[in-house]
Structures are given as C-alpha cells and as structure tokens.
Image (tube, helix red, strand yellow):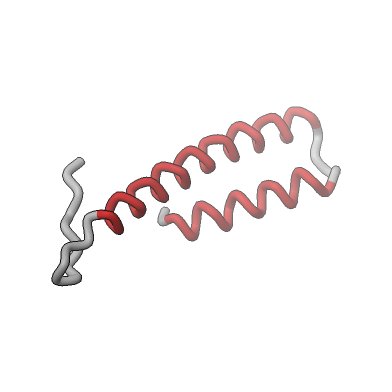
Amino acid sequence: MNFEDNLKKLEQLVAKMESGDMKLDDMIKAFEEGRKLVDTCQKDLESIRQRIEKVTKSGAVEEMKA
C-alpha cells in the first residue's frame, strides 16, 4: 500500500475506535494495527523528506540508496 492508502486506513481505524462500538479485544487489535500504520507512514514521510532534500540544482531528484 502507498502512503495515502495507509493514511486512509489509519483514519478509518481511528474513527471506528472513537465510535465506541468496538469490544475491548477488537480495540486492542485495531490499536496495534494503527500503531504499525503510523510507523509505516512516518518512514514514508522521512523517505519523502530525504528525497526533497536531494533535489539538485537542475531540479532533478536523486534516488536515495536504501
């Protein structure tokens, strides 16, 4: 999944948790899934930030080596 998909899924999880209609066990599982999504989104944003910083004077973006 890409950043936008992960963010949308995270927003859906939060809305579902905030609704108060979940059992505790389901809420814990949703929280764990949400935590993983947050970590993934943060890594994606860091990668994007690094790519932006690598923009050369000519306007080209240098690929980051993993």
Q: In this orientation, which residue lies closer to the viewer: 33 or 48?
A: 48
55 relative to 34 in the view: left or right: left
- State the residue lying farthest toward the front: 57
Quarter the C terminus occupies: top left
- State the residue lying farthest toward the bottom: 58
Q: Position of residue 55 (x, y in %)?
A: 22, 61
Q: Quadrant of residue 29?
A: top right
Give the residue at x 70% y 47%. 14
6 relative to 61 in the view: left or right: right
10 relative to 23 in the view: left or right: left
Q: In this orientation, which residue lies closer to the viewer: 42 or 7?
A: 42
Q: Position of residue 32 (x, y in %)?
A: 60, 32
Q: Position of residue 34 (x, y in %)?
A: 59, 40
Give the residue at x 67% y 47%. 13
Q: Is residue 56 above or below residue 44?
A: below
Q: Is residue 42 above or below residue 25?
A: below
Q: Position of residue 53 (x, y in %)?
A: 28, 55
- State the residue lying farthest toward the right: 20
Q: In this orientation, which residue lies closer to the viewer: 41 or 29?
A: 41
Q: Is residue 31 above or below residue 20?
A: above
Q: How many marks?
A: 0
33 relative to 25 in the view: left or right: left
Give the residue at x 70% y 30%. 28
Q: In this orientation, which residue lies closer to the viewer: 45 or 18?
A: 45
Give the residue at x 50% y 52%. 6
Q: Quadrant of residue 27?
A: top right
